[in-house]
């Protein structure tokens, strides 16, 4: 499902594209798939529907591009020199993402897909893939440094990290959410520590 080509004579406007995709995700975060419409997105963005249809042939195409645009921001693959540093960077980005309305939209898509409310698998797969990539790279580097034993299974570790950050986000009160936005590293530190301790090689 590629983006619809822009007609000749109408050059792309990256700022407007970003505005429209942001509006699409905010609309989804508020209403979910059942009430997600091109008209609603246009209204939220303050433009006519034609601005959307000149770029995307359908709401499916619009949502796909919007998801991919946001998911790119989570592809953090920074080598900090330690597993703790790498996972802290990833968990911090993930917490900030979940605390943002646009990030919440991507989460809602994965939940809707899992609950089989509608066929959102293409969108869900793109979100999950982007999240797994950075974590897999972090654990791979940890094995190379000797911080983890070779042959470790990454998937349970990745799910533990993302699950812990998600549950922390859901459990936060409004005051705690404000503190998490101001000091995300402090909030994820205990979650990262649990995982790092669990993968340390056994001393012989």
Image (spheres, rainbow, N blue to C red):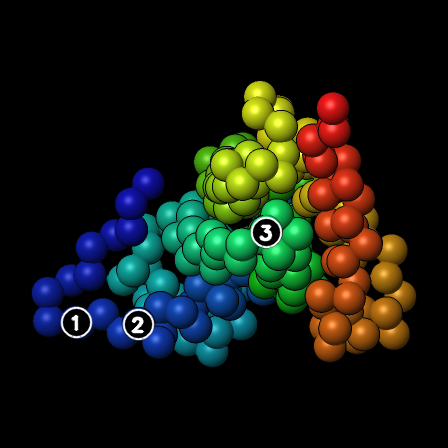
138 and 132: which is toward the camera: 138
Front position among marks 3 and 1: 3
Quarter of the image for residue 162 reads: top right
Q: Is residue 114 above or below residue 25?
A: above
Quarter of the image for residue 161 reads: top right
Q: Mark 2–mark 3 contact, CB under 8 Å?
A: no
Front position among marks 1 and 2: 2
Q: Is residue 145 above or below residue 170?
A: above
Residue 195 position, x and y percent, is 74, 41
Residue furthest to the top in view is: 151
Q: Which residue is mark 2?
A: 14
135 and 63: which is toward the camera: 135
Q: Which sits earlier in the primary sequence, circle 2 or circle 3?
A: 2
Q: Residues within 10 Å of mark 2 (few under 14, many from 20)?
A: few
Horizontal placement of 109 versus 163: left or right?
left
Q: Which sits earlier in the primary sequence, circle 3 or circle 1?
A: 1
Q: Which residue is mark 1?
A: 10
| Mark linked to residue 82 | 3
Residue 160 position, x and y percent, is 73, 38
Using the rendered image of the protein, determine whether residue 56 is visible from the camera's viewpoint: yes
Mark pair 2, 3: CA separation: 37 Å
Residue 2 position, x and y percent, is 29, 45
Front position among marks 2 and 3: 3
Q: Residue at x 15, y 62 (%)?
A: 7
Helix, strand or loop under label 2: helix
Q: Is residue 177 above or below residue 110?
A: below
| Mark linked to residue 129 | none
Helix, strand or loop under label 3: loop
Helix, strand or loop under label 1: loop
Q: Residues within 10 Å of mark 3 (few under 14, many from 20)?
A: some
Residue 175 position, x and y percent, is 87, 74
Quarter of the image for residue 154 reads: top right
């Amino acid at each position: 499902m590629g983006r619809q080509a822009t007609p000749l004579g109408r050059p792309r406007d990256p700022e407007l594209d970003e505005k429209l995709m942001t509006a699409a995700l905010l609309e989804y975060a508020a209403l979910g798939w059942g009430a997600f419409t091109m008209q609603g997105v246009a209204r939220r963005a303050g433009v006519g529907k034609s601005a959307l249809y000149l770029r995307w042939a359908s709401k499916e195409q619009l949502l796909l591009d919007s998801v991919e645009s946001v998911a790119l921001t989570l592809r953090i693959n920074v080598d900090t020199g330690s597993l703790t540093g790498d996972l802290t960077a990833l968990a911090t980005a993930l917490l900030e993402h979940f605390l943002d309305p646009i990030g919440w939209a991507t989460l809602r898509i994965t939940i809707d897909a899992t609950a089989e409310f509608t066929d959102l698998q293409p969108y869900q797969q793109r979100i999950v893939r982007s999240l797994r990539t950075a974590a897999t790279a972090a654990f791979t580097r940890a094995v190379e440094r000797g911080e983890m034993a070779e042959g470790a299974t990454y998937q349970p570790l990745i799910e533990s990290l993302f699950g812990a950050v998600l549950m922390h986000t859901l459990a936060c009160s409004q005051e705690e959410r404000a503190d998490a936005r101001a000091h995300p590293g402090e909030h994820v530190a205990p979650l990262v520590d649990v995982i790092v301790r669990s993968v340390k090689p056994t001393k012989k």
